[in-house]
Image (spheres, rainbow, N blue to C red):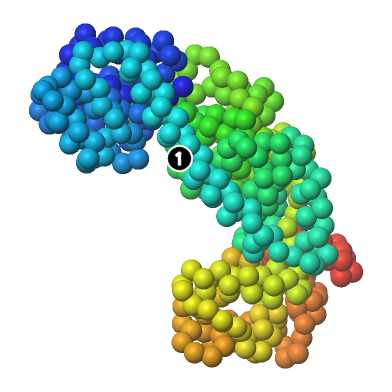
Amino acid sequence: MARILVIDDEQTLRTELKRVLAREDHDVEVAEDIPAARALEPQGFDLILVDLRLPGPSGDTLLEEVDDVPIIVMTAFGTVQSAVDAMKEGAVDYLSKPIDTDELLLIIERVLKNRRLEVENEVLKREAEANRPSDAMIGDSDAMQEVFRHIEKVAPTDATVLILGETGTGKERVARRIHALSDRSDEPFVPVNCSSIPENLIESELFGHQRGAFTGAHSARTGLVESASGGTLFLDEIGELPPPAQAQLLRVLQEREVRPVGASTARSVDVRLLAATHQDLESMIDSGAFREDFYFRLKVFELELPPLSERGDDILELAKAALERSARELGKSELRFDDEALETMQAHPWPGNVRELQNAVERGVILHEEGPITEEMMGLDEADADSSQEAKDGESLEDYFVRFVTQHEDEMTETEIAERLGISRKTLWKRRKRLGIPRQS
């Protein structure tokens, strides 16, 4: 099914084309002129049929206003030269009036098929880029090897996965890898950053809406959950979802159906949910900000990514991979780090994790003029000077962690300690356990 917009000043033709196309299960909207079409937001359609001769602005006006939506022009005049001119301006095909419905359906089927192939090719390109051996999936450390083993075990299942980790540890990369190794890999992977959707639009964005469901809903819209049907929905920053949206997603997981805003009936969906957060959801449950039933529905399989500071020599491997990519993108070659930069990178705490490392390397490549890349080019000399105010000379990161926790646990809460260290409360608890620092009662 496709969303098709028909623009023609003849009411009889509009009605007939809507009937013919609706019979083929297409969602059809009609308009009598360009201003009426603009009110329907033509950019949101899959295909547009437009007459070249219209009262007011001509049909070819739309060719200049709408990008990435195939347009078929209709004409009843002369030698079809006007239609040929329109195709030169970007129309994908034309039809001569009176319209032959069989020809119309064949052209629409071909155009929509070509459109799907273009979209699928773009998706495949993005997926290939996302799933090639890359920064977030590099790791010989024990912690990352365990992550890889868990990915391989859970990927072939349809289990919901909750991916935990500090900001910048590569949670979306892991989600994409799970999708790529699953039986759904040929279907859509739909990533959604929950923190980027305004609260008043969350319901419409996730679940869709019917035309007229609310002010401004000029046309029906398919929600992101339904768009992911057959494939994988990845909800990043799941802790940012307000409780009402959590309740609706819980129903999606339980009933396998979604009801768009303004719809009288629900629609079946087959979607696998992957979620990620850097927040402590258990603490959010205690404060009432996160639903406990939704949390346990998400936590079918929990996968926690280690911070970069706990990945040892992975830091240098990630840095080299980032260097190769940045050098290639910026047209530079044969770049390398000097010894001081390598030592600094291994000692740096990396509170921003892999993302911070990538940004530092890219900065170094941008500023590079000659010789090896230095810590100054990467901006790490200033960062180290700042961190040295708290860490003593020659002190390892683990020693600093032990000293900081034991010195401040009587005067700070666990949340405050975790925030000062740039880690989650759960990571703080795990490091306490691993380093033998019991929490004082």
- Please say if 67 is above or below 313: above
- Please say if 103 is above or below 251: above
Q: Residue at x 36, y 23 (%)?
A: 107
Give the image location of residue 410, x and y in percent. Answer: 77, 70
Quadrant position of the C terminus in the picture = bottom right
Please identify the residue farthest to the front as the structure is shown: 79
Q: Name the residue under label 1.
A: 118
Q: Residue at x 79, y 67 (%)?
A: 140
Q: Quadrant of residue 320?
A: bottom right
Q: In which quarter of the image is residue 85?
A: top left
- Badge 1 marks a residue whose secondary structure is helix
Q: In which quarter of the image is residue 12?
A: top left
Amino acid tagged 1: Glu
User: Can the viewer see residue 59?
Assistant: no
Give the image location of residue 215, x and y in percent. Answer: 33, 27
- Please say if 87 is above or below 213: below
Give the image location of residue 360, x and y in percent. Answer: 55, 75
Taking 2 as reference, is 62 left or right? left
Q: Which residue is drawn at 63% across and 70% down?
A: 321
Please identify the residue farthest to the right as the structure is shown: 436
User: Can the viewer see residue 430?
Assistant: yes
Q: Which residue is drawn at 41% across and 10% down?
A: 23
- Please say if 414 is above or below 404: above
Q: How many other residues sit within 10 Å of disc 1, few (<14), some (14-19) or many (≥20)?
A: few
Taking 269 as reference, is 331 left or right? left
Q: Viewer-proximal residue, 420 or 338?
A: 338
Q: Viewer-proximal residue, 95 or 116?
A: 95
